[in-house]
Image: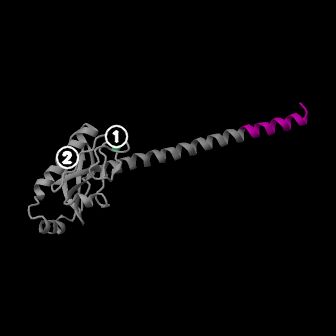
């Protein structure tokens, strides 16, 4: 063996050794990082799960708004409508998720009066299967159909595709063509039952 071959061999073993060392280090670091990530992931999932186990809070304005509604509509029976809204949510959950829903709480969020139309927006804390979520709904009252079209607050969404139906008295959704439940005049209609999370 001449000196050049020996130098070459030494250099070669350095390169191979160094390469192996780097690979080993990288593998070790990778394992460490993935362990950490794995722990974090598990921890975060646990946290998310425990959050889901608690009912979503609903901070309504029922106490403030109900007296105002009763001033305008002395016959308005909140207990009855609350019951009807909760029943609609249960039906909606059963239809869309094929599971049962427990309603913890339903509160009035907003009371919007306009020329010819009135809307009461509500929010409910809902337990759906083993998940906690929230559903909104609206009670709509149309005093005068002439105002319903031009009024921006009365927007009913298609139960099938969610598209807004802005034209009062329309029988079919203009996007998906499914039949639209007609809004009756001078009675409260429960509309736009939807999950808001
Ligand atoms: Zn539609």
Please state the horizontal and vertical placement of residue 9, each as a whole percent of the image. Answer: 81, 35
Please state the horizontal and vertical placement of residue 180, each as a whole percent of the image. Answer: 27, 44
Q: Residue under circle 2?
A: 88
> How many marks can you see?
2
Q: For the N terminus, which image quadrant?
A: top right
Q: Earlier in the sequence, mark 2 or mark 1?
A: 2
**Disc 1 CB within 8 Å of nearest ligand 1 atom:** yes
Q: Residue at x 84, y 36 (%)?
A: 8
Q: What secondary structure is found at the residue carrying circle 2?
A: helix
Q: Which of marks 2 and 1 is in front?
A: 1
Q: Which residue is drawn at 21% across and 65% down?
A: 61
Q: How far apart are marks 2 and 1 (CA)?
A: 23 Å
Task: Specify whether residue 10 is painted magenta.
Answer: yes
Q: Name the side, left or right, on which 184 lies relative to 192.
A: left
Q: Which residue is drawn at 79% across and 37% down?
A: 12
Q: Which mark is residue 177?
A: 1
Most prominent secondary structure in the magenta stretch? Answer: helix
Tell me the colour scheme of the image.
one colour
Q: What stretch is highlighted in magenta?
A: 1-16
Q: Residue at x 80, y 39 (%)?
A: 11
């Amino acid at each position: 063996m001449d000196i050049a071959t020996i130098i070459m061999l030494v250099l070669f073993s350095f390169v191979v050794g160094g390469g192996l060392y780097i690979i080993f280090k990288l593998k070790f670091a990778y394992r460490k990082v993935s362990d950490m990530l794995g722990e974090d992931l598990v921890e975060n999932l646990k946290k998310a799960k425990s959050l889901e186990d608690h009912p979503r809070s609903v901070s309504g304005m029922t106490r403030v708004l109900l007296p105002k509604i009763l001033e305008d509509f002395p016959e308005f029976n909140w207990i009855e409508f609350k019951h009807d809204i909760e029943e609609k949510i249960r039906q909606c959950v059963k239809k869309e998720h094929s599971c049962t829903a427990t309603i913890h709480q339903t509160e009035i969020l907003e009371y919007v009066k306009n020329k010819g139309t009135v809307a009461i927006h509500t929010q409910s804390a809902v337990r759906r299967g083993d998940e906690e979520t929230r559903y909104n709904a609206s009670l709509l009252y149309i005093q005068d159909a002439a105002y319903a079209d031009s009024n921006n607050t009365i927007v009913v969404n298609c139960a099938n595709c969610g598209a807004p139906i802005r034209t009062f008295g329309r029988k079919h959704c203009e996007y998906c063509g499914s039949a639209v439940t007609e809004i009756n005049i001078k009675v409260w209609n429960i509309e736009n039952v939807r999950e808001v999370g």
